[in-house]
Image (cartoon, coloured by chain):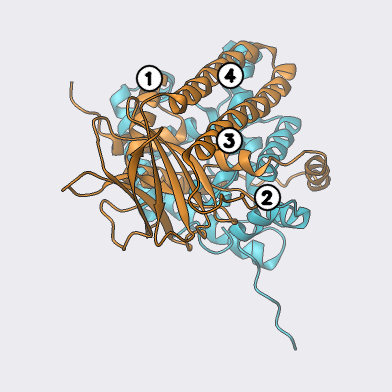
Chain colours: A orange, B cyan
Amino acid sequence: MSEPRWNEMVGAYVLGGLEADERRAFEERLHQDVELQAEVARHHEVVAGLAHALPTVQPPAGLKQRVLDAARSTPQKTPALQAMDGGADASKPTRRPASAPSLLPWFAAAAALVVAVGLGVLMQQAEDRRQVAERELATTEAAVAELETELAERDSLLATFLGPDVRTASLSATGQPPSARLFWNTSTATLLVAAFDLPPAEKGRTYQLWGIPEGENPVSLGTFQTGPDGTAVFRRQAPEGLDFQLGAVSEEPAGGSPQPTTTPILVGSWTQAQ
Amino acid sequence: MASRPPEPDDATLASRVRSGDEDALARLYDRHSEALHSLAISMVKEPADAEEVVTDAFLKLWQGGWSAERGSVGAYLHVVARSRALDLIRARKRRGRAEEGGARQEPSGFALPVSNPGPGPEEAAHRTDRRDWIGAALGQLSEAQRTAISLAYLSGMTQREIAEHLSEPLGTVKTRIRDGMHRLRDLAPTLSGGAG
């Protein structure tokens, strides 16, 4: 069977026009295709513009105050939740370890973060779903099924980074900040990345993570952005079969590059976790 | 006479919102609520439901859901609002409360003429720019392309459902959506710039 033409599916994807099986296949591809991610982002901007072509209906006069009142009574997510839920950002500083940290505290912290973030996200989503279900009873079964699936995924993620086939790498420039830690489960090709003291990339720029096989060109592992405090925590799926000895981070144009166009900011190699 | 400081862009305001700045949230509301409410009303029809859609979008922003990696703040709010509106539409459909025959309500469609700049000179200019662009860009599409995109955008129909609704071949609908969206993308200015 021939490979779908992913770029031709972007418009339908952002409009929600794909069937469930098409959407799942597209999203699997999207996770590992930087250019496709950029194309989706461009289409999202276009779709957002469509709202300006609709007949204008002014919001009710009191809605602004009701929104502000609702915000005032709604707790904001913790920085850790924002970091995982938002992909890369957190609003408060994350404590950095002392120099030359041992592996185990890092690993334990990452595992704890996965647990805390996973449960927190699930709790938030459960609350959102509960409110919808109160009004729309028929949606309850679907919402519960979705949460169970997500819980299973979080459990799986935790197991992934507690497994025996985990490598870690410390990425840095000179041993000084900024820095990053990579945890790589080689069995599942799953990466957990935590970056620290890395100022947010300028407008129109982004950070890009690379895996570099010995004697070969770098392979993109996707783009990311740090929060105002310079931290980012996220999970990525490495291309199947990829084995690389070096990890690196470079600053690239928004949307990422096929190959690094700047000198890497952070570089490091794997060590087997003990 | 002292000149006014430049208006902070959306990304700056959204960062402040994450730190609990209610004034920043109010300013983003001023910029985006009209478009979000117009979208919500076009999709869910009921004013109370539309209000809930708009409120949910801003609460997601308040809870730190946006990050620069997700694109512009406006696009993020739009995605959240549209997703919530589609939830409501699908829930109605499942409960059999949809219009006669269980079919979706026909979307009102796009308003191509540019009008109603809205309050405030800076916000009005911002909105008018977008209205100018999107109105002109939609005018470049065929009626069939606009119809297919409108059905997906406002009713949440999949391409297969649109094909059945219009009694057209699925391949034809896919081509219309693909070509129409690519055309809009090619005509789009840098929508995330400025206050957007």
Figure check: A41 above or below A202: above
Q: Disc 1 versus disc 2: distance between alpha carbons?
A: 35 Å
The amino acid at mark 3 is: Arg
Question: From mark 3 to mark 2, how far is it between C-alphas?
Answer: 22 Å
For marks 3 and 4, give the CA distance. Answer: 21 Å
User: Looking at the image, which is closer to me, A244 or A46?
Assistant: A244
Q: Residue furthest bottom?
A: B1
Indicate which disc residue A21 carries.
1
The residue that mark 2 highlights is: B18
Q: Secondary structure at mark 2?
A: helix
SS of the residue under disc 4: helix
Cβ atoms at labels 3 and 2 below 8 Å apart: no
Name the quarter where the C terminus of chain B is drawn. Answer: bottom right
Choose the circle earlier in sequence order: 3 or 2: 2
Location of residue A94 in the rendering, given as x and y in whole percent from the top left corner: 61, 49
Q: Which mark is residue B82?
A: 3
Q: Are discs 4 and 1 both within one chain?
A: yes
